[in-house]
Amino acid sequence: MSSNQALDLKLLKKFKNELTRFMMLYQFGIDELNTKIDILKQEFQYIHNYSPIEHVKSRIKSPESILKKVQRKNLDLSLPSIKENIKDIAGIRITCSFISDIFEISRMLENQSDIEVVEKKDYINHPKPNGYQSLHLIVKIPVFMSNGIENVYVEVQIRTIGMDFWASLEHKIYYKFDNEVPAYLSKELKNAADTVAMLDKKMEVLHEEIRKLDSDDDIENELNLLNASGQKLNIPMALLESLSKDKE
Ligand code: 0O2
């Protein structure tokens, strides 16, 4: 091996290490946000007695897709430029039961002091012409590394089960036809999106009705039970009475 080749290999290895560290940052951003979402989920469960989050998925954009986006957007091919201009390298998708949960979770995330919402797209109140619905947030979150703080962007998509079902099918169809979806299928997809929106609204109304039926009896029955991390613990009535006297 010539000295030039050895130098090239050394340089390539250096770039690979830089790229690996760069991608790790996004995984750490996702990890931090996932912890926050998990805490919100448990707290919500405690307050409202049901889980608003059906599931959470995350992904890191592949270097290949990042490169395609850099070319499509005509960006500078450098890590600082990619970091500042491509804001969906890290992505989290939260699937909720009801539309109101989407906005509640979004509000709870927005209220966290170390999260900065830099962009918000409401495709629920303003669906895309093809029928796509979802709430998109681009958030900036600090990652504490050994040599300082790095702020990373994470794209958070929040949607109902129905919206998610529709989007994954539409995505498959879109790719199958290589972006040239026949008109009759686009029309059917739009009809399906309208049906999803109608169903989501109906489910929301039913959900509200059920909540109203939660009687005071239920509150009394639950009074001496404390729910901590899914574990139900008995609270002695004497302790509860003593604590409430302190507050009087
Ligand atoms: P992937 O593989 O999911 O990451 P951008 O291109 O991000 O700079 P844009 O297009 O304005 O700007 O972003 P927008 O509207 O917020 O959409 C970003 C992501 O939302 C997409 O990411 C999709 O995941 C999803 N999305 C948006 N529109 C549609 C749609 O019509 N159908 C479906 N199924 N998903 C949609 P990517 O990068 O396209 O793909």
Image: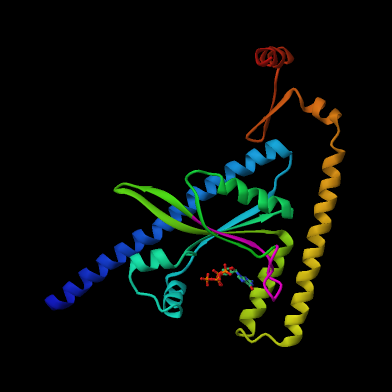
Front residue of this view, candidates 205 and 4:
205
Q: Quadrant of the N terminus?
A: bottom left
- Whether residue 9 is visible to the viewer of this picture, yes or no, is yes
Residue 129 magenta:
yes
Is residue 70 shown left or right of residue 216?
left
Residue 237: quarter of image: top right
Above or below for 66 versus 161? below
Q: Quadrant of the C terminus?
A: top right
Residue 94: quarter of image: bottom right
Is residue 3 shown left or right of residue 85?
left
- Whether residue 1 is visible to the viewer of this picture, yes or no, is no
Quadrant holding ligand 1? bottom right
Q: Position of residue 99 (x, y in %)?
A: 73, 55
Above or below for 152 versus 146? below
Is residue 53 shown left or right of residue 64?
right
Magenta region, residue range: 125-139
The residue under the point 78% across, 79% down is 188
Front residue of this view, candidates 120 and 213:
120
Residue 26: quarter of image: bottom left
